[in-house]
Amino acid sequence: MSKLTAPQFPAPFSAQRAGVSGAAGRHKVALKPGRSLMDWVRLTKSGKDLTGTGGRSFDVTTEELAKHNTVNNCWMAVRGKVYNITPYFEYHPGGVDELMKGAGKDGTQLFDEVHKWVNIESMLESCYIGKLKATPVPVEKSGSPLVKKLYSSLLSAKGHMPPPAPPPIHIPEEKPSPRLDWFQNDSSVTLTIYTRWNDILREHVIIDKKGQKLQAAVVVKDMTYMVHLDLANEVHEKCGVRVSKGTGKLEIILRKVVEGRRWLALGDPLEGHNTYEETGNKEAVFRECKVLSIEPVSHDTHLYCVQLPEGCRMSVPIGHHVHIKANIEGMSIVRSYTPVTASLQYKVPPQLEDIQDEIIYLMIKIYPGGALTPAIDRLVEGSKVLVSNYEGNYQESHMRDCSHLILLAAGTGFTPMVKIIYKNLIEEWEGSRQIKLVFFNKTEKDILWRNQLELLAQENPRFGVFHILSEADDNWDGLRGRIRKEILESFIPPIGEGKKVMICACGPSPFTEEAIRLVQEMGYSLSRIHPFMG
Ligand SMILES: Cc1cc2nc3c(=O)[nH]c(=O)nc-3n(C[C@H](O)[C@H](O)[C@H](O)COP(=O)(O)OP(=O)(O)OC[C@H]3O[C@@H](n4cnc5c(N)ncnc54)[C@H](O)[C@@H]3O)c2cc1C
Ligand code: HEM
């Protein structure tokens, strides 16, 4: 069986999280058979004592915590709770070494930096020992409060040699906050947010409105500006959003219920109003959404159309993903999914654009042995599903100066490519950018939206789709095998031609890593490659 098709964990596609070589280097590891998330769920329900304390619960001091710092006896504190993580080592998708970074310590910061959305309280409930007493011991980092404290105590110690130069202290770049203003006419009230970011899009605001309570999260790159108000007067449920391209101005238009009434104030500020924080520091928000329709895409993949709750509007930007959360056998499981468009065949008419902000399309492959997708498979029209705010680091400006866009996708790694194709070829039908989708699958029946892709290629000469199959039958006369240099060389222009090429890659870890390696071997720098990551 070829490398591309071998069953693997992390799930094929979770590999969207593969790091760029030389970048942060966060990786999922191959877990041993019998060590999947579902196996962990079963172990925690088996009644076996996973606390290592005979099930006894007690408060833990930082001194006691520090004693449990080996692979055979390891405790970690996260958000004030101490867990025995010894039994979890073999099940940790990030591997043993990563977990050991928090051994005997408060690992909250490390944990949140990597996967704040993982529901540790639920996953490690059966490993819970007790509350962390006193001040947590921070993990030493250059410039951390602990390092600074040690350094200053060294300085004040009289009679000692002058200490070496202090470690470089990272001073976060000052990011000026957006500014909020408002104005009104007889029928509407408009909130204007000057984001100072010229690339702002309508997708960058997520609105939740219930009665007179209005919450708007404006995502400005890696920061979020919050508007949270109890409005002074009633407004209609639906609101509009307008952005002025190139100025950074974003407007939220509210329609007055009582036309002609002059508002004396906008309203009262509620918790978090007018704050500007790193998005990564914010709590994950999950909303109960309704499944409107489910359509088959292939033998194991479906297209789910999901409606956001009333009063909420969120349009997920290109290359961003949401999380779905479900309770599986008593444990809260969270997985990531990249929204797609309804189809690649027609453009959404402008009058329906607002409705699009209330709906999310998800293309999800079902793994019968998986932890979450069997539960997704049981959803029917009308079912409720918990969907989070979006996350991601792809900026549309990545594409701006490119004339040739090469999309390398494997399996459900196709999902982030859908919105890129839609934007470039359907929304901007008259554009000039050349786009090639090089799509790797096992067999013909695994190819997602094959007809739509081929139709689009026939209709728009700027688009080409090329299939490569690793387990094709004898009737297949196209390309075969897995990602390799000769294949890429036949689709990616040689570097010397001076074309402005951008390459996006998404698929299982080995696929994405190989794509990055081969493209670099062809002479392209990392700045011309965008691997989709979680
Ligand atoms: C940013 C991001 C975006 C994503 N977008 C999408 C998307 O749009 N669409 C989509 O379908 N998926 C997407 N995924 C993948 C998705 O998040 C899940 O990983 C996937 O749905 C599987 O979840 P699961 O819990 O059902 O399966 P898991 O429990 O993770 O298992 C997955 C598969 O691996 C097998 N397995 C588990 N453990 C082992 C083992 N030890 N040895 C061998 N095999 C094992 C299981 O039987 C199953 O077949 C995305 C992932 C990321 C990170
Ligand atoms: C020091 C603390 C920790 C570090 C540094 C760490 C690091 C990592 C890394 C690097 C990954 C791979 C991420 C990726 O693919 O992008 C990962 C995945 C994961 N970790 Fe941890 N981890 C820590 C603690 C924990 C703990 C305590 C749990 C227990 C609940 C946990 C649960 C998970 C899960 C469920 C995933 C898979 C996420 C996914 O499917 O995308 N981690 N971790």
Image: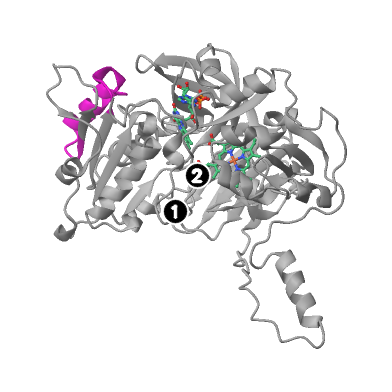
Q: Nearer the viewer, residue 104 or 401?
A: 104
Name the residue: 18% across, 43% down: 491
- Mark 1 Cα shell of 10 Å, populated few (<14), some (14-19), many (≥20): some
* Residue 213, x across and y down, in percent: 73, 37
Name the residue: 37% across, 35% down: 507
Q: Nearer the viewer, residue 515 or 326?
A: 515
Q: Nearer the viewer, residue 348 or 156?
A: 156
Which region of the structure is painted magenta?
441-464
Q: Quadrant of residue 207?
A: top right
* Residue 37, x across and y down, in percent: 57, 26
Name the residue: 41% across, 43% down: 532
As for residue 443 lying within the magenta part, the answer is yes
Q: Amino acid at mark 2?
A: Gly
The circle drawn on residue 68 is none
* Residue 211, x across and y down, in percent: 73, 31
Q: Residue under circle 1?
A: 245
Report if residue 394 is visible in the image: yes
As for residue 246 lying within the magenta part, the answer is no
- Mark 2 Cα shell of 10 Å, populated few (<14), some (14-19), many (≥20): some
Query: Splitting the image into four quadrants, where does ligand 2 fall?
Result: top right
Q: Is residue 304 above or below residue 238?
A: above
Q: Is residue 102 above or below residue 6?
A: below
Report if residue 191 is visible in the image: no
The secondary structure type at the circle numbered 1 is loop
Q: How is the image coloured?
A: one colour
The secondary structure type at the circle numbered 2 is loop
> Quick one: quadrant of the N terminus?
top left
Q: Nearer the viewer, mark 1 or mark 2?
A: 2
The circle drawn on residue 392 is 2
What separation in Å lies between label 1 and label 2 (alpha carbons)? 22 Å
Q: Is residue 366 above or below residue 228?
A: above
Q: Indicate if the residue with disc 2 has its beta carbon within 8 Å of ligand 1.
A: yes
